[in-house]
Image (cartoon, helix red, strand yellow):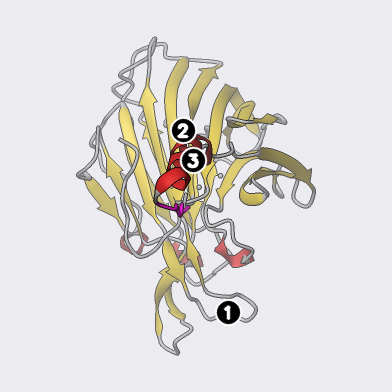
Amino acid sequence: MQSRRQFLGLVGGLAALVLMERTPMAQTLASPVYAVERVPNPDQYRFLCDGLHFMSLVMEDEYGRINDFRPHPDAMPNDNAWGSSFYLMPFTPGATLKHTDLPTVTADSSGILVESSGGVSMGSDTEIGHWASSLHIQYDIPPHRITGNGTYEINLDNPLDQELNLFRIASNYLINVPLRDGTTGNTGDMQRANYYLHNPPHPDGSWIPIYGNHFPQDITDDLLIEMIGNFNNVDVPGVEPAYKPNITVRITSIPPQSGIPMIFGGWYDQSQSQNPYSDNVGITPLILNRGIPPNLTQLRYMLDFESTPYRGASGIILR
């Protein structure tokens, strides 16, 4: 899981000359200080930049070990400002996400490097292969932007003969719930998801969960998913209204298995449409079990990640 100084100078005579000589030193900005700390309940790494907690990597839930990036680009103390999650781990449709190894997480002056691995989840407790990822994460304090880039590889035990989800963005969308202003309406951690089959700036489609599951059949080997955050103002005791962050992920197939077709997938659990604590939305790049090379067992990808605060408008930075 997302810079403002004003220099006042004197003018005239020797003071101006001294100021000119000092300008290069005055313009030198200190590098950000990155750090990580591991805390329990749930087991997680907190990512810090200059002391600001801007993201967590959650490594366990009630089902087992996971690889769940939770961005918090505002880095503000409001606990309700945490929103959607990015589960970087492959799974077959309907599987319980688990089987992740403990990651290696290191911080230095350039950012935070996360090296993760685990088993490919199928069903409630089956593994059908192994995966590994490397993601280098940075944080720009103003404008509160988290970025990440790296690689992602999946090795299957047998040739792929079923659909495969490459990752999951999990979120919450609420329908006809009481709002803080006394009315009833829709809210949650997200508004919609835009998807781009090759490149921005114009999306090839957009999905709002209220319309139900969405699996368009347009294929690509270079998919960008932009999930737009929201102002969540559901009227629930003890939960303050908060802006929920945007999440953008781009996944690009690379050799030796470039050209593997994938589609955008979005599903919504309408039985949980009024549960503010449910991850009732899932967004994924999905590999179909057709149109793929025979004997396909290895998948390799480049990844780009970004999370920014939601402020009522979106703007893609990944290009």
In percent of width and height, residue 257 lies at: 38, 14
Q: CA distance from mark 1 to mark 2?
A: 34 Å
Relative to 200, is 7 above or below?
below
Q: Is residue 162 visible?
A: no
Disc 1 crowd rating (10 Å Cα; few below 14, some 14-19, many 20+) is few
Amino acid under label 2? Leu
Which of 240 and 213 lies nearest the eye of the viewer?
Answer: 240
Could you tell me the amino acid type at mark 3?
Answer: Val
Name the residue that disc number 3 marks.
Answer: 18
Amino acid of disc 1:
Val
**Callout 1: helix, strand or loop?**
loop
In the image, 20 versus 273, the foreground residue is: 20
Horizontal side, residue 29 vs residue 251: left or right: right
* Furthest residue in direction right, as rendered: 40
| Quarter of the figure that contains the N terminus | top right
The local secondary structure at tag 3 comes to: helix
The residue at 37%/62% (across/down) is: 191
> Residue 55: which numbered mark, if any?
none
Q: Which label sits in the foreground, 3 or 2?
A: 3
Residue at coordinates 59% horizontally, 66% vertically from top-left? 80
Q: CA distance from mark 3 to mark 2?
A: 58 Å
N-terminal-most mark, 1 or 2: 2
> Disc 1 vs disc 2: which is toward the camera?
1
Q: Which residue is mark 1?
A: 236
Please give left or right for residue 172 compared with residue 122 in the image. left
Residue 199, relative to residue 225: is it above or below? above
Choose the circle earlier in sequence order: 3 or 1: 3
Q: Which residue is mark 2?
A: 166
The overriding secondary structure of the stretch rendered in magenta is loop
